[in-house]
Amino acid sequence: MLLSTILQNAAPYVLAATGCLLADRAGVVNIASEGMMLFGALAAVLGAGYSGFGLVGLLAAIVVASLLAAILAIFHLHLRANLILAGLAVNLLATGGTVLVLYSLTGRTGDSSGIPQGSLPEIAIPGAEHVPVLASLSGQSIVVWLALISLPATLYLWHRTRLGLYIRAAGESESALVESGLRPNRVRWAALLLSGLLCGMAGAQLSLSTTHGFVRDMVAGRGFIALGAMYLGARTPVGTFVAASLFGVLDAVATVLQVRTNFSTQILLSIPYVAILLALFLNGQRLRRVRRGIGGVS
Amino acid sequence: MSASETIAVVPRQSGAWRRAVLRGGGRLAATVALAIIVIFVLLAMSADDPAAALGSLLSGPFTSSFRTGQWLSDSANLMLSGAAVAMVFRAGQFSLGAEGQILVGALAAGAAVLHLPSFPGVFVVGLTLGALAGFLFGLVPGLMKAYGGSDEIVSTLMLNYVATYGFALLINRYLQPASAGYPVSDFFDPAAFLPSLRIGQLTIGLALPFAIGCCVAVWYLINWTKTGFEMGAVGASVPFAQATGMRVRRSVWLSMALSGLIAGLAGAVIAEGSTHRLIVGLSANIGFDGILVALLTANRPLLIPLAAVAYGYIRTGGDIAQLSSGIPREVITTLQGFLILAVTARAPLAWIRHRAGRRRPAHGGPVIPGPAPLRAAASSQRTGS
C-alpha cells in the first residue's frame, strides 16, 4: 500500500528530474519544468475529459509541455533571451494561462470540476496480487511504468547513442561539438523538447493518476524540487533517479503523517527545499575542494 | 552565469548613452503597445465583453480616489521590490529570492509590532526589523555562493518556498487569533500603520516617497560609492575584478544581502502600509513583479519609479477588472510572462536579418548559428563562421 503511494508520488519527480537533467547537461538549465508540468497537468485533464481516453490526455500533456519547451528554445536559442528569465516567463505563462484556459472553458478559476474526469490507463500484472512487491506495481498507471523505464532509457541514451554523447558535449565542450561539424543549438533544441516531453508526462501523472482533476497551482513547486533533485543527484542519471525517488518517498510519508498525526504540514512540505539547500551547499564545498587553487567564485 | 549578460550597462558620458536611452524609450513604447494587445487577446479569450473589460482594466485606477490611492500604494511596493532586484542584477548575481525575502521582512515587522507595546513611531521599529530580517535572509544564499560556490538561482528559488511555508507555519502557530478561521494575524495597532497623507479625497502613504528614496539610494550606492563600483565590476567580469584586487566574495554576499534588505523593507511596507496585518499570500507574487519592473528599466534604479507606476497601473487595473467584470486577475500574470519574454529577447531584429541572410550562400562555409549567451566563454574559443 505504502509502496504504491510512493510510486505514484515519485513518478512525477523522476520524470521531471530526468527532463531537467537532459536539458542541464546540454547546457540549458530548465527552470520552466514547473510551468511545463502545470500546463501538462491541465492539458491532460482536458484531453482525457473531452475525448474519454486517458492516452489522449497523456498525449495532450506531452504536446502542450513540448510547446512550452519550444517557446523557451526559440526565445533562448534564437532570440538570445536570458535562459533563466525566459524560464521564469514560461512559468508565469503557465500559472496565468492555465487559470485563463480553465476559466474560459468552465467559468471556474479554482479547479476542473466542470470537466469529466478521465484517468490514465493502468498496467496490471496478471496474478501478482499476492506477491509482495509486484502487487504494488500491478495496476499502476502507464506513466509510473514509464518513470521506472526512464532510468535504463536515460542510461542507454547517455552511453550508447550519439544523441546522448552530443547532449553531454553541448554542455561540457561546445567547441568540440562545433569542430565536429555539429550545431550545438540543434542539440539543445532536442534536449529541451525531450525535457518538455518528460515534464508533460509528469504533469499528466499528477492530474490523472496521483490525484484526480486539475487544481490551480497544483504542481506547487514540484518542478523546482525536480530541478533540485538533479543537483542533489550530482547531475548523473542514477543520482538524479535516486534523489527524485527520495522526494517521492518523502511526499508519500508526508501524506500519511498529515492524515494520521497533527504534525505540521508546513514543516513536512519544506523538507525537500531544505534538503536541496543543504545538498547545494555540500556540493559547492566539494567542487571547491576540487577547484582549489584555480580560484574564486565562478 | 551572470545577469550582466542580459543587461548591457552602457557607460554614460558618451553619445552611446544618449542613443541607448532613445532606443530604450522606443522599446518601452513598443512594450506598452504589446502589453495592451496581449491584454486584449487574453480578455477576448476569457471575457464575455472584452471591450468593456479592457475599458474597466485601463480606466480602473482613476474611477475613484480610493482606487487611485490603491494604485499608488501598490506602485510603491513594486518600486521597492524592483529596486531590490535591480540592485542584485546590477551586481551580476542572479537572485530570484525577492519573494521570500519580502515574506520574511513582513513577518519580522508584523511579529514585532504585534508584540511590542504601542507607542508613536513603533512602525519604524517594524521597518527596521523587516529590513534586518531581509538582510539576513539574503545573506544566506549570498554566503552560500561566495564561500560555498552554490548556484544562487536554485538556492534562492528553494529559499522562497522555505519562506512561504515558514510564514504560514508561524502565523498558524503563534499569531493567529483563536477566532480567525483562516491563517491571518490580528490587525496591527494604528501606531504601527505607515503614516499617510490625505490630500482632499486621495490618501497617499508615506510608502511612496520612501520607495522613491530607496531607488535613489540604490542608484547612489551603485554609481557613486566604491562598494557599488566593486559590485558592478564583479558583475561585469569576475576575472577582471579579481585581477585588480577587488573583494569578489564580499561583493557577492553583500550585494545579495543588501538586495534582501530592500526586499525585507518592501515586506514591512506591505504589511504596515497595505494589509495592516499578516495574511498568508501577502506578497502576492510581488517579488517576481519586481523582476519585471527591474527588467523594464534595464536595471536603472532612477527609472524604476516610472516603470513601477506604469506596471502598477495595469496590476491595479487587473484587480479592479476582476471585481467589476469578473475576469480572473491571472490575465495580469500571463501578461507578465509575455512581457518578460518580450523584454529579454535581445535580438529579434538581428535574428530575422540572420534568417533572411542565410538564404544567400555566405562565404562558402556553413553558417553556424549564434551561441547561447550563457555560453559566452565557449563561444570565444570558436573560430567564427
Image: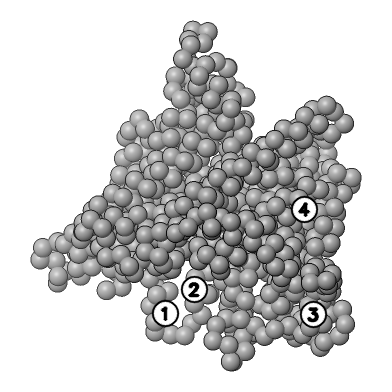
State which chain disc 3 sits on.
B
Residue A215 circle label: none
Residue for badge 1: A257
User: Quadrant of residue B111 in the image?
Assistant: bottom right
> How far is the residue under mark 3 from the one under mark 4?
25 Å
- Category of crowding for the residue at label 1, using alpha-carbon neighbours closer than 10 angstroms: few (below 14), some (14–19), many (at least 20): some
> How far is the residue under mark 4 from the one under mark 2?
40 Å
State which chain disc 2 sits on.
A
| Left or right placement of residue B300 versus residue A18 in this view | right
Assign a secondary structure to mark 3.
helix
In the displayed orientation, state which residue is furthest to the top.
Answer: B364
Are the two marked residues, 1 and 2, in contact with CB atoms closer than 8 angstroms?
yes
- Residue at 52% x, 54% y is B51
Q: Amino acid at mark 1?
A: Leu
> How far is the residue under mark 1 from the one under mark 3?
39 Å
Q: Nearer the viewer, mark 1 or mark 3?
A: 3
- The quadrant of the image that shows the N terminus of chain A is bottom left
Residue B305 circle label: 4
Could you say which is closer to the camera, residue B185 or residue A275? B185
State which chain disc 4 sits on.
B
Are the two marked residues, 4 and 1, in contact with CB atoms closer than 8 angstroms?
no
Q: Amino acid at mark 2?
A: Leu
Q: Amino acid at mark 4?
A: Pro
> How far is the residue under mark 1 from the one under mark 2?
9 Å
In the displayed orientation, state which residue is furthest to the left.
Answer: A127
